[in-house]
Amino acid sequence: MKIAFAIEHFDPRRGGAEQYTWSLAKWLAARGHEITVFTTHAEQPDFSVEINLLDVPGGSRARWPLRVAAALQAALRGKTFDVVHGANHIWPCDVLRLGGGVHVAFEHHNAMAGPSPARRAIKEFSNRWLPRQRSLRENERHQFDDPARHFIAVSQRVADDMARAYPSCVGRIHVIHNGVDCEKFSPDAIAPRRAAARANAGLRDGEIALLFVSNNFRLKGLHDLIAALPLLPKSGVENFRLLVAGRGKTEPFKRLASLLGVARRIHFLDRDGAMLDHFAAADLLVHPTYYDACANVPIEAAACGLPVILSDMSGINEVMAGNGGVKIISMPCPPDEFARTIASACAPDFRGQARAANRGLALQNRIEKNYERVLALYEEIAAAKRGGRAP
């Protein structure tokens, strides 16, 4: 098949959507498909692919997605592909995968993650009126206005958001959950890294390491997690440290930790550290997000055999809930309840149970399963286009 990918950055270091698109393109190329990428920026791939850099004119940051769309339309003119796969804010395409979910839903949940009613109200107001947010909503309306376009929802949560916000797309939504690379993420992969990773994180022998990973600390509930830390000793966990990995703003959370007397319990890791090293140092992943379309980190941690505490606001809990090594909490979670949940997940019996249970869960959700379902959708769309009918 001739398959085109349209994504703003074709660079696996940029984020989850970029990493996914890169890996899917590589998997398809290895199976003989002809891959073309339309993008504003690309790293040099180690597989066969044609790169087309989009000519996007300068202008206001707020209108950037619309200018990218116009440049993509111009670049596609006169070219023929079996299927064009768009990602993130792209909309001239046959099938669109919104790795971060529906923007209007994200706006709401991002505001609700504010630490106070006043902050939440300010965020809701700014979302409604800031030029960039208004432009993103306009761009999203374009994404959903093509009656022939199909949509990959990375969870049922995202599919439901699509149906509520854009009811005309119902019938063209395909739920395909994220998968995990079980060769890259495994107990065998992290075991030889553990001693060095824990030493680099300043962990002492016997210290239980809680791991939090995000590039948006507020949305992913770091303030809620920090608020629970002072109560952990009362719940039976005295020897612990919280490791925070990601590119979020640290100062507000350092101030909160100092105010609550737990600053010495928190270590902010190197922003450019390898995820395998973070998992190797940790004993437990805590992911108390206020919104996730379908987070990768929880199932990657599970593939490494780590216990996971997961918010009910993440789409990945549709895959992980009910598993023997996973505990689900409702956000916002009261600090005392949160502390008790962490303590129960730190128990040696639960951690031992999680090693096998979570690895088994990951093996049932390999990334190849996701790729195969996406390819089947491509084939359906391509066949419909050849037949001159709606897929």
Image (spheres, rainbow, N blue to C red):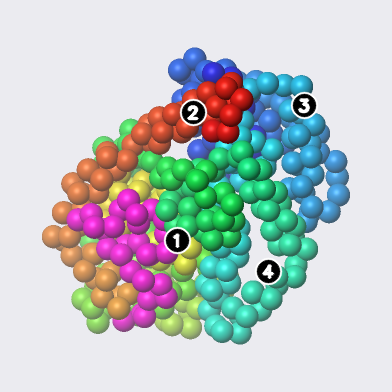
Label located before the other in sequence (1 or 3): 3
**Mark 3 surroundings within 10 Å by alpha-carbon count, few (fewer than 14), some (14 through 19), many (20 or more):** few
Give the residue type at disc 3.
Answer: Arg
Q: Which dot marks residue 244?
A: 1
User: The residue tagged with tag 4: helix, strand or loop?
Assistant: helix
Q: Which dot marks residue 380?
A: 2
**Mark 4 surroundings within 10 Å by alpha-carbon count, few (fewer than 14), some (14 through 19), many (20 or more):** some
- Residue marked by disc 3: 77
Give me the C-alpha separation between circle 4 and circle 1.
27 Å
> Which residue occupies 63% across, 43% down?
147
Give the residue type at disc 2.
Answer: Glu
Give me the C-alpha separation between circle 2 and circle 4.
38 Å
Give me the C-alpha separation between circle 1 and circle 3.
46 Å
Give me the C-alpha separation between circle 1 and circle 2.
43 Å
Query: Which is more foreground, mark 4 or mark 3?
Result: 3
The vertical placement of 297 against 260, above or below, is above
Label located before the other in sequence (3 or 2): 3
